[in-house]
Amino acid sequence: MMMLPYVISFSVVTDAKEIDVLRGKTSQCGNFGYQYDEQTLDLLKKNLARNGSLYLLARRGEDFCAFCSTDTDWWEDRYFFLREIFVSPELQKQGIGEELMRRCIAHARERGAEGIVTETASENLPMRNLCEKYGFVRW
């Protein structure tokens, strides 16, 4: 993992209002684009309350850097769902997403998960590469 030239703090989201920091955030990678709209924020807030959920925020000082979440809203018992991972575009490729994913995977394992799954667009190459790095298998 690349060493960061500044301190990034990671915190667990405990209040659904903290998720609002994502409102309007966007990401673009080639033809793939993503924006956090009200529907997405409402779904995140709903699943934060699920037993076993882990929602993480990364910040540099008070500034938002990244977000990642995993929860148990998957159709197979004993599997966790990596719901979201978002790193501010200007901070990508610095190891922040890797650290968030590592923490979410460890969280699922500590709770006895048989596996962790995610869904991503085929055009989202950074996410596909990150998933491959952590041993996700294309399904």
Image (spheres, rainbow, N blue to C red):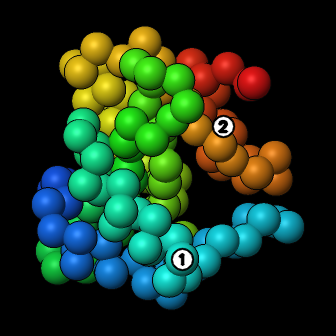
Q: Quadrant of the N terminus?
A: top left
| Residue shown at 33% from the left, 36% from the top | 104
Find disc 2 in the rendering and name its residue: 129
**Vertically, is 49 above or below 122?**
below
- Type of amino acid at the residue the image marks with label 1: Gln
| Residue shown at 65% from the left, 43% from the top | 119
Q: Quadrant of residue 105?
A: top left
Q: CA distance from mark 1 to mark 2?
A: 27 Å
Q: x and y percent of residue 38 in the render?
A: 50, 83
Residue at disc 2, secondary structure: helix
Find disc 1 in the rendering and name its residue: 39
* Most foreground residue, 33 or 118: 118
| Residue at the extreme right of the image, as rendered | 31
| Residue shown at 27% from the left, 61% from the top | 57
Q: Is residue 2 left or right of residue 138?
A: left
| Residue at the extreme bottom of the image, as rendered | 24
Q: x and y percent of residue 61 in the render?
A: 15, 74
